[in-house]
Image: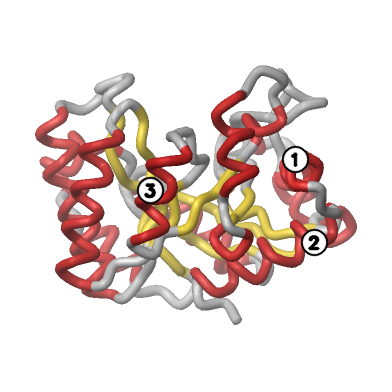
Amino acid sequence: MFIDSHAHLDDPRFNLDRQALIRTLKDNKIDLVINVGADEKSSRTTLDLANNHENIYAVVGVHPHSAKDLEKSGLEPIIQMAKEKKVIAIGEIGLDYYYDNSPRDIQMKWFKKQLDLAIDLNLPVVIHSRDADKDTFDTIKEAVDKGGLRGIMHCYSGSVEMAREYMKIGFYISLGGPVTFKNARVPKAVAKEIPLDRLLIETDCPYLTPEPYRGKRNEPMFVRYVANAIAELRGLSIEEIAKVTTENTKRLFDLV
């Protein structure tokens, strides 16, 4: 059985068949799905999904793309959702200097506030980082030193060297569809090097669909292709990758 450690089943692309898909998770060897919010609205729909389905858990937070919206709304709605029983982390939060959909100073302001929230509530964080490696790491390191923060680098796209730095401060590394792409040199290098006790797998569905379904809508059951790619790179069985990543996910999110 697998755990998809990062999904967006609340996305409109699942509107026509969401319930049918969820009903088939067990049949497709998906034990649990961790659904992740990106703003107040998607955090609410994520929480609704989790409350209505035993095998779905919720992560609530505001993505750097939407950080500018927090200038008006503030964090109070996220704080209240984060206290719900089925909420197991704060995310997806972080920095995105590729699109810059929110000004960088605003991204940083609300990234720090959400890290503080996670520390206050003793919840792990799910981190998004794109073209912001140094600022992301320095900000997380500061929070770890201040309050014992723990978390995961979602759909990690950085170097092996930076992954090692994250693991030194206790973070986990999650890999998704890109590790299956033919020319994805860096994700494949990371997949070979990450210690098994720090590795998670995800789909980020409906995005980043792995081979052989690249170009189509991604789904939680496709996480097996991520696991298989990692298994082949490391000379292990897919069952070994499923077992260790399930154990790691449950440990990080306190689902043991």
> From what the image shows, is residue 200 above or below residue 72?
below
Which amino acid type corresponds to the residue marked 1 in the rendered image?
Leu
- Please tell me whether residue 149 is drawn above or below residue 135 in the rendered image: below
Which quarter of the figure is the N terminus placed in?
Answer: bottom right
Q: Whole-Å distance between the Cαs marked 3 and 1? A: 25 Å
Quadrant of image for the C terminus: bottom right
Q: Which residue is mark 3?
A: 127
Gap between marks 1 and 2, in whole Å? 13 Å
For disc 1, the marked residue is 233
Question: Percent x, y for residue 203?
Answer: 64, 42
Of tags 1 and 2, the one toward the viewer is 1
Dividing the picture into quadrants, the one containing residue 218 is top right
Q: Amino acid at mark 3?
A: Ile
Which residue is tagged 2? 240
- Residue 13 visible in the snapshot: no
Q: Residue at x 59, y 72 (%)?
A: 250
